[in-house]
């Protein structure tokens, strides 16, 4: 399953809900303001790092760029995908859950 999250983890609890319910091996894609969850040194960094132990966590590269987030600020192990990679994730997974 692919989980997409688009809300900032500092404003909504979508990330926490997703990570609580996502199963090992699921793909999680952070888009729009959710890309802030992929940066190191935040109050959600440990939560995301724990999720990466058994889930595949990625961010949408164009959303990072549009928010001025340098890739060097990302947590180690976070994948970066472009729009084609986003499409690949949707094709790979038979279900997509959007967390709003």
Image (tube, helix red, strand yellow):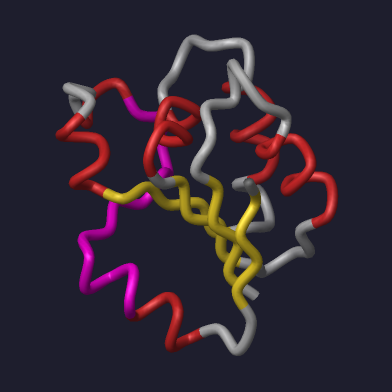
Asked if 10 appears above or below 25 in the picture, the reply is: above
Q: Is residue 81 left or right of residue 52?
A: left
Residue drawn at point x = 35 percent, y = 29 percent: 74
In magenta segment, residue 6: no
Asked if 82 appears above or below 40 in the picture, the reply is: below
In magenta segment, residue 76: yes
The quarter of the image holding the N terminus is bottom right
**Quarter location, residue 49:** top right
* Foreground pick, 16 / 51: 16
Residue drawn at point x = 66 percent, y = 38 percent: 15
Q: Is residue 62 left or right of residue 53?
A: left
Percent x, y of residue 28: 56, 57
Asked if 37 appears above or below 84 in the picture, the reply is: above
**Quarter location, residue 11:** top right
Residue span colored magenta: 74-87
Residue drawn at point x = 23 percent, y = 26 percent: 67
Asked if 48 appears above or below 2 in the picture, the reply is: above
* Foreground pick, 16 / 75: 16
């Amino acid at each position: 399953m692919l989980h997409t999250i688009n809300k900032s983890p500092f404003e909504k609890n979508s990330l926490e809900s997703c990570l609580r319910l996502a199963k090992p091996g699921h793909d999680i894609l952070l888009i729009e303001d959710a890309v802030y969850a992929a940066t190191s040194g935040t109050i959600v960094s440990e939560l995301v790092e724990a999720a990466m132990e058994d889930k595949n966590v990625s961010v949408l590269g164009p959303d990072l760029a549009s928010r001025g987030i340098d890739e060097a600020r990302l947590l180690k192990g976070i994948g970066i995908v472009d729009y084609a990679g986003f499409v690949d994730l949707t094709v790979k997974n038979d279900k997509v859950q959007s967390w709003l």
